[in-house]
Image: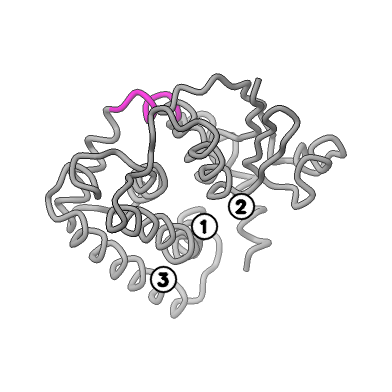
Amino acid sequence: MLKFYYHPISVNARRVWVALLEKQITFEPILVNLDGDQLHQEFTAINPLQRIPAIVDNEFRVVESLAILDYLEAKYPTLPLMPIEPEAIALARMITTITVVELQPMTLPLTRALVGLEVEPWKLEAAQQRVANILQFLEELLNGQTYFVKDQFTLAEVVAGTLVPSLPLESYPYLKAWADRLAQRESWQQTVAQPAAIEAALPTIRKILEQRF
């Protein structure tokens, strides 16, 4: 059985978790507590980078969320999460890349400020402006459709949809409606981080953010 190493507050892990549920892949969830479990020899043997998510499928290991998503899509093509038309593939890939490479790093200063850590004002302002620019771009791409690729649920939703809804969307009505639709999906409801888990993880989150700046 496929083993999935995760923590419920990890956005990176959640996108893999959602994909596993959406594709109806049987898996064994293995909790990795971020206060030290990731440093243990057993997990380091799976991922020497000592971070989640990771999967082990029939002794084959994959780390890094986007690589895991590509593997799951290729290995388990039933209930596909990628379109087949060239333009649609490019659109889905563009959105997943923008989310991970551009948007997610810009949320770190915002989260740092949210948990009470010091952020230089210019860094916070620059992050806020960059996030706003990205959200506006995604708003224009969505353009009132059900999903980014018209009515097809794809990896664009899996990746962007596990990060974007945590941001203020009042100025982006298409994204807000899209996020509300995603919240109704069973995979979102099963994987949403519970307040108690977030509260318990706050000290660890602070330590991680302190190390990033």
Tag 3: amino acid: Ala
Give the prevailing secondary structure in the magenta stretch: helix
Residue furthest right as drawn:
41
Q: Which residue is mark 2?
A: 206
**Foreground tag (3 vs 1):** 3
Report how far apart the C-alphas of labels 1 and 2 lie in the structure: 9 Å
Of the pair 202 and 171, the residue shown nearer to us:
171
Q: Which mark is residue 19?
A: none
**Foreground tag (2 vs 3):** 3
Is 4 placed left or right of 197 in the picture?
right
Q: Residue at x 42, y 47 (%)?
A: 159
Tag 1's secondary structure? Answer: loop
Count of numbered circles in the view: 3
Find the magenta span and give its range: 185-191
Q: Residues within 10 Å of mark 2 (few under 14, many from 20)?
A: some
Tag 2's secondary structure? Answer: helix
